[in-house]
Image (cartoon, rainbow, N blue to C red):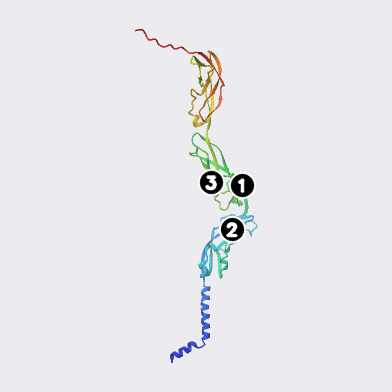
Amino acid sequence: MKKIQLIEKVTHNWQIKIVCLIISVLLYFNYQGNIMETRIFSVPLSVVSNRDLVPAQKTPKTIRIVVKASKDIIDTLQTGDFSAFIDADQYLQKGIYSIPIQINLSQRAQLFEPLQVEPKPKVITMLLEERTVRDIPIKPIFTGEVDEGYEVTGYSCSPDQITITGPKTAVENSAATLSIVLPLANKNAPFTQTTQIKPLIPNDLINISGASSVYMNVNILPKQLTKTFSGVNANFASLNPYFQVKQLSNLSITVSGAQNALKNYKPSQYTAQVDCSSIETEGEYTLPVSIHLPDGLTLVSISADYINISVEPAPVILPEVSGAQ
């Protein structure tokens, strides 16, 4: 009997009971879907400044944003779905402004509902100044000394100047020249040095136009010297062995060359040569002189192209005669 009564109670108005059950299930899932969860992201912050005013103070590279959405949406969101920016182009005069932070959503994030995004902080106080452009020449600073006997004969750099852009105060306070340090120690040949520009201008408010590197070519060559040698004795080539020669005029030569080659050089007996093959009798002659130098040395001048000589018979040396036994 009790069993029959229970069945009757369950089936009584069963259509209404089923409808209520369905409504309850829907309300449950709707409630679960509307529970908002919170998550904090750190996103990049950029500044829009395409007109005459630019930031004159550093801005944070990132800010925090508070995102509220259902758990299903929160679980799918990523940092790349958000970016933040402040718009400096809305201001026309230099000054200090409280600029609101604006948030961009990715196309994917724009489809999510409900979704609440709030930046922390909401505004940034910023000084804006006039945009200023300036050209700065590039100059080398040589440090140390090249190897002995060598010297720097010139240099070139590409580019030879850079263009910087930024707020007026920062640009005007920049150095008049961009100095590139070039160490010369232990150098004895031409070399090229590549230098990154940005580390030399560490102010983040300043932008550098054009090349990001400077290529500095330094030319190093042996140091050239000039030296004069006096009292050079000539070598009388092809002389008839029955004659002997006396040099009547002094001879000096001026030679140029690398310092390391010239500092230890001394004329040899074959440096100045006179061709005596045409001499057939004794007497005085004026004959041309030719100069012969080692590789790397160059004749600058000679005291005379001709030399005066006196030709005499060579002494006769008789053989010794052995004494009688």
Mark 1, Cα crowd under 10 Å, few <14 / some 14-19 / many 20+, is: some
Work out whether 315 lies above or below 162.
above
Q: Residue at x 51, y 79 (%)?
A: 25
Q: Position of residue 42 (x, y in %)?
A: 52, 62
The amino acid pointed to by label 3 is Thr
Q: Which residue is mark 1?
A: 135
- Cα distance in 3D space between marks 2 and 3: 29 Å
Q: Position of residue 324 (x, y in %)?
A: 36, 7
Q: Secondary structure at mark 1?
A: strand
If you read the primary sequence from the N terminus, does the residue marked by circle 1 or circle 2 appear first? 2
Q: Position of residue 272 (x, y in %)?
A: 52, 22
- Cα distance in 3D space between marks 3 and 1: 18 Å
The amino acid pointed to by label 2 is Val
Q: In the displayed image of the protein, which residue is found farthest to the left?
A: 325
The amino acid pointed to by label 1 is Asp
- Numbered-mark total: 3
In depth, the one of 98 and 225 nearer the eye is 225
Q: Which residue is mark 3?
A: 195
Q: Secondary structure at mark 3?
A: strand
Work out whether 307 lies above or below 34.
above
Q: Position of residue 90 (x, y in %)?
A: 64, 60
Work out whether 317 lies above or below 204.
above
Residue 47 badge: 2
